[in-house]
Image (cartoon, rainbow, N blue to C red):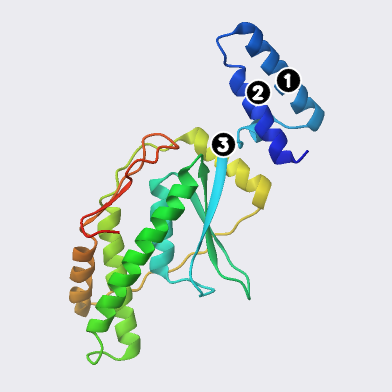
Amino acid sequence: METGKIIDKIYKCLRLAESCNPNEAAAALRQAQGLMRKYGISEELVSTAPVAESSVAAGERYNPPFWLMALSELVACAFQCRVYLLRAFGRQTRLKFIGLGAAPEIASYTFMVLQRRLADARAAFRRRLDGEEDEAEAERQADVFAQAWLYRVAAQISHFAEDGEAQQAIDKYIEVHYGQVRDAPRDPTETVSGDILAINCGLRAGEDVRLFRPMRHGEAEALLESEGGA
């Protein structure tokens, strides 16, 4: 039996051990303890059972732009997930969200919606600069626009206290399944005094996006609202 399936079975037994029926609870606890001894699985490892993951395409570039990575971090934070960049030469770069229950799947979907929205807004602003700026400067200002959009959206996220136990379970899951992971820091585009148009346009474009974090893991109510449509 695969380790993951064993952990899931132990986790379910431990949940049954919380039953109000004392006989059922005792039997479930004995079964859980027996499986843990048999397969050498610790309680810490069992705590990773509710952790899930979901991945989404991050575009064709091996090194995605800062604004895309910042967006993924923003969404991960909103759903108490971790997000990691998976990349390899010859393969499409992907983002993997890791969290509890349905949170990673919801985060992936939310990221896809917002990524399309931001990419379209950035492209529309970029077209405004055709003929006014050279290619490099137009791209730089479009990145500034995207950063301002993200700043506006980030300021409107509903903030809740972090769940310490959930984060420990995610840490353990990452350690077991992925081992050592590395940070991939990316620097934002520096702004100059002439970027006021890009900044103001980005702020206005992000005004109608509302991102709400669910109060409990697994809640999938309307988490993303947009006056302009998704």
Tags 3 and 1 in contact by the CB under 8 Å rule? Answer: no
Q: Give the mark nearer the N terminus: 3 vs 1.
A: 1
Quadrant in which the N terminus appears:
top right
Task: Give the residue drawn at x 61%, y 37%.
Answer: 48
Q: Give the image location of residue 84, x and y in percent.
A: 53, 57
**Along the line of sight, the residue nearer the viewer: 103 or 193:** 103
**Numbered circle sitting on residue 31:** 1
What is the C-alpha distance between the residues marked 3 and 1? 19 Å
- Residue with the mark numbered 3: 50
Q: Give the mark nearer the N terminus: 2 vs 1.
A: 2
Classed neighbour count for the residue bearing mark 2: other residues with Cα under 10 Å, few (<14), some (14–19), many (≥20) = many
Seen as rendered, the residue at the extreme top is 22
Q: Is residue 116 left or right of residue 184?
A: left
- Residue with the mark numbered 2: 13
Quadrant in which the C terminus appears:
bottom left
Callout 2 amino acid: Cys
Task: Give the residue drawn at x 20%, y 80%.
Answer: 194
Query: Tag 1, which secondary structure?
Result: helix
Q: Give the image location of residue 15, x and y in percent.
A: 59, 22
Classed neighbour count for the residue bearing mark 1: other residues with Cα under 10 Å, few (<14), some (14–19), many (≥20) = some
Task: Give the residue drawn at x 22%, y 77%.
Answer: 195
Tags 3 and 2 in contact by the CB under 8 Å rule? Answer: no
Q: Is residue 40 left or right of residue 49?
A: right
Query: Tag 3, which secondary structure?
Result: loop
